[in-house]
């Protein structure tokens, strides 16, 4: 009886992990239209974002928000999420966003105009 319970639990865990893996795998990329939607939403809400997240300059705050949204949207693990030493600046956030897009964009698109728009003071 104990072996049956263990086997059922292992099957349940394996099933859940496979379902979770399928979900994460399905969210592991972002296309140009979705990236544009996210950046435009951040730009539209920029004053509210800056007001409630006083972490640095305007551009640092907005790029930090974009990076956070990408990490969440793509369900990135800790090993896939860029790490920083010291206090990151706007260029550090831009490079981290470029790094994520290199590995997770469905097609090669130019993110620079969107990063520039969020970086405009």
Image: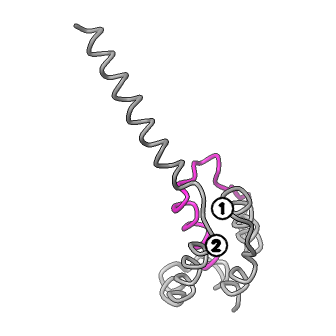
Query: Residue at left 32%, top 15%?
Result: 6
Q: How dense is the environment of label 2, judged by Cα within 10 Å: few (below 14), some, or many (20 and up)?
A: some
* Residue sticking out furthest to the left: 1
User: Does 28 sit above or below residue 18?
Assistant: below
Mark 2 lies on a secondary structure that is helix
Q: Along the horizontal axis of the image, is 79 left or right of 111?
A: left
The answer to which of 65 and 57 lies nearer the viewer is 65
The residue depicted at 64 percent of the width and 72 percent of the height is: 32
The reply to whether residue 41 is visible in this rendering is yes
When asked about the image quadrant of residue 57, the answer is bottom right
Q: Is residue 12 magenta-colored?
A: no
Instruction: List x then y, in percent, for residue 31.
Output: 61, 67
Does the CB distance between marks 2 and 1 fall below 8 Å?
yes
Q: Secondary structure at mark 1?
A: loop
What is the total number of numbered labels drawn onto the structure image? 2
* Residue extent of the magenta highlight: 61-85
Q: Position of residue 53 (x, y in %)?
A: 52, 78
Q: Quadrant of residue 56?
A: bottom right
Asked if 67 appears above or below 36 in the picture, the reply is above
Image quarter for residue 65? bottom right
Residue 67: within the magenta? yes
For label 2, the residue is 32
Q: Residue sitting at 66 percent across and 61 percent down?
A: 106
Residue 90 appearing in the image? no
Of 111 and 82, nearer the camera is 111
Q: Report the quarter where the C terminus lies.
A: bottom right
| Mark identifier at residue 106 | 1
Residue 19 image position (x, y, % from top left) = 42, 40
**Distance from label 2 to label 1 (Cα)?**
8 Å
Left or right of residue 112: residue 46: left
Q: Residue at x 68, y 87 (%)?
A: 117
Which quadrant does the N terminus fall into? top left
């Amino acid at each position: 009886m104990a072996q049956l319970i263990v086997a059922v639990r292992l099957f349940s865990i394996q099933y859940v992990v496979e379902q979770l893996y399928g979900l994460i795998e399905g969210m592991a990329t972002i296309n140009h239209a979705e990236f544009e939607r996210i950046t435009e939403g951040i730009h539209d809400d920029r004053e509210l974002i800056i007001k409630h997240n006083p972490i640095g300059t305007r551009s640092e705050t907005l790029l930090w928000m974009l990076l956070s949204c990408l990490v969440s949207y793509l369900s990135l693990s800790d090993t896939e999420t860029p790490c920083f030493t010291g206090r990151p600046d706007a260029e550090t956030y831009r490079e981290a966003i470029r790094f994520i897009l290199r590995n997770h964009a469905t097609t090669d698109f130019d993110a620079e105009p969107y990063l520039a728009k969020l970086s405009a003071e």
